[in-house]
Image (spheres, grey):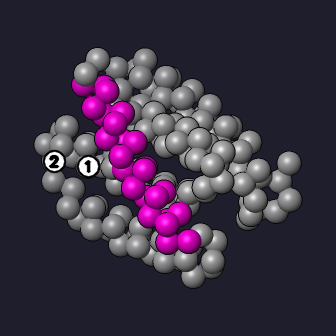
Amino acid sequence: MIDSYHMVTIEERKFPTLLFISICYILGNWLFKSTVVDILSLFYFGYGLLLIFSYALLHFKIKLSLHTSAVGGLIGFLIYFSYHYKINLIILFSIFFLLSGLIATSRLRLNAHTIREVFLGYTISILSQFIVYAIYYII
């Protein structure tokens, strides 16, 4: 199903994306049932939503940088985590913003993605985390 670990073609990205969607929702459901760490389940639900968007965009021949999506999703989670618990994570944010810049730069320097793919991955991942957090408080 996959010719190389670079997953150059869009068709090679479809199965791993579906696999990770199911893993995210299994982990999210498991953590949500545990009332101690239910906010951590939102992290996995947010990644699952991001991967659903990513899979949908694959049908339009648009691929996202999943590396920048991963760090963007983590930053999105940390934003609402710090908001929810009213704690200051400014040093952690600084570290992860620098890390996200390094990851985005490396994806561009390796010619693995275009600027659009990197930006879309980063933006959609942060938005998916916020969408999941907003839904959590509507329900």
- Residue 5, quarter of the rendered image: bottom right
Disc 2 from disc 1: Cα separation? 10 Å
Q: Main secondary structure of the magenta part?
A: helix
Q: Residue at horizontal 52%, vertical 42%?
A: 53
Which quadrant holds the C terminus? top left
**Is residue 134 a member of the stretch shown in magenta?**
yes
Q: In this view, does 72 lie above or below 139?
A: below
112 lies left or right of 25 = right
Query: What's under tag 1, amino acid-wise?
Result: Ile
Which circle, 2 or 1, is nearer the viewer?
Answer: 1
Q: What residue type is labelled 2?
A: Ile
The residue at which mark 1 appears reads as 79
Q: Is residue 113 at all visible to an observer of this figure?
A: yes
Estimate the x, y position of residue 103 in percent, counting from the top left.
49, 71
Q: Quadrant of residue 20?
A: top right
Report the magenta residues as a range.
114-137
Is residue 64 one of those drawn in magenta? Answer: no
